[in-house]
Amino acid sequence: MVNYKQLHYFWAAAKAGSIVRASRQLHITPQTLSGQIGILEESLGIALFRRVGRGIELTETGQLALSYADDIFQTGNALEEALRTGTKERYRLFKVGISDSVPKSIAYRLLAPAMSLKEPIKIVCREGKLEPLLGELAIHKLDLVLADRPMPSEMDIKGSSRLLSECGISFFASENLTRQHGKLFPKNINNAPLLVPGEDSTTRKRLMQWLSAQRIHPQIVGEFDDSALMRAFGQAGIGIFTAPSIIEDEVLQQHNVTKLGQTDEVIERFYAISVEKRASHPAVVAINAAIFQKDAP
């Protein structure tokens, strides 16, 4: 049997990234904390941490242990809260990684089927670059990753990528820019200020190829990893910007901008990436079963 007090000490140290920092949080001495983690490692016959200079870092096995410890202690916290508040329903934790390149409203649409299950779900969302998120997925710290491309073939992760949604892109501009560049699309983008997704976005590559094929040469005045930030700059009139056509009504209403044009020659795609161990999670099953077509409302 795993000693859960020792496991909690390991979990606290892994979360804090430091024996000293964790010992302060737990109100015990660093020597006691280090000794208890050592006893846990000895009982399991594996090393959970390795020394790096004066600090520590998780071994590969330690990363796996941390993912299980996360589940254990999050469940423990949920139990404590349920007993304290008298809640009758038990919520199942659903941990999702969302790539920076996926617009927030698209992420919500893709995750919505999980929130409609009969079994209550507590969702935890993490945002970031795709590769670190896939690393967390591989060690089961996440149940699912949403991205604008499938899992890269060069990554040594046994998982699957399911296409959930695809659509073209629409171009938007503030009232002032619309007056200057509101004529025939797409020629109205030529020489106009344009905001584009960051280099890590697959849409960026497709957009630039399409502009080149159309012999259109805008002035790139901004690059953004975060689509919400790009829209904020676009709303302020800094440049024309794009968004998935599936959410164009939302963009028009929220940002007080005008639609300049639309093309289906630049396709945005959104994928659900999961690994075998998490594929049976009811929320993952529900999301993979719901495919949002190009003409979805």
Image (cartoon, grey):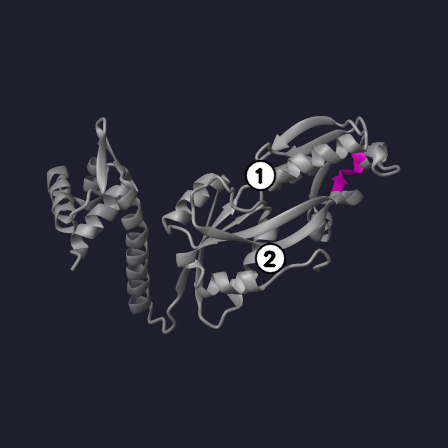
Q: Which residues are magenta?
A: 171-177
Query: Residue at left 48%, top 73%?
Result: 118
Q: Nearer the viewer, residue 115 or 69?
A: 69
Query: Residue at left 61%, top 52%?
Result: 106
Q: Which mark is residue 275?
A: none
| Alpha-carbon span between mark 1 and mark 2 | 18 Å
Secondary structure beneath label 1: loop
Give the side of residue 141 with respect to residue 115, left or right. Answer: left
1 or 2: tag closer to the N-terminus: 2
**Residue neighbourhood size for the residue with mark 1, other residues' Cα within 10 Å, grouped as few (<14), some (14–19), many (≥20):** some
Q: Amino acid at mark 1?
A: Asp
Q: Nearer the viewer, residue 276 or 16?
A: 276
Q: Is residue 175 magenta?
A: yes
Q: Which mark is residue 109?
A: 2
Secondary structure beneath label 2: helix
**Residue neighbourhood size for the residue with mark 2, other residues' Cα within 10 Å, grouped as few (<14), some (14–19), many (≥20):** few
Give the side of residue 14 with respect to residue 107, left or right. Answer: left
Counting from the top left corner in percent of width and height, residue 119 is at: 45, 71
Quadrant of the image for the C terminus? bottom right
Q: Which residue is mark 1?
A: 226
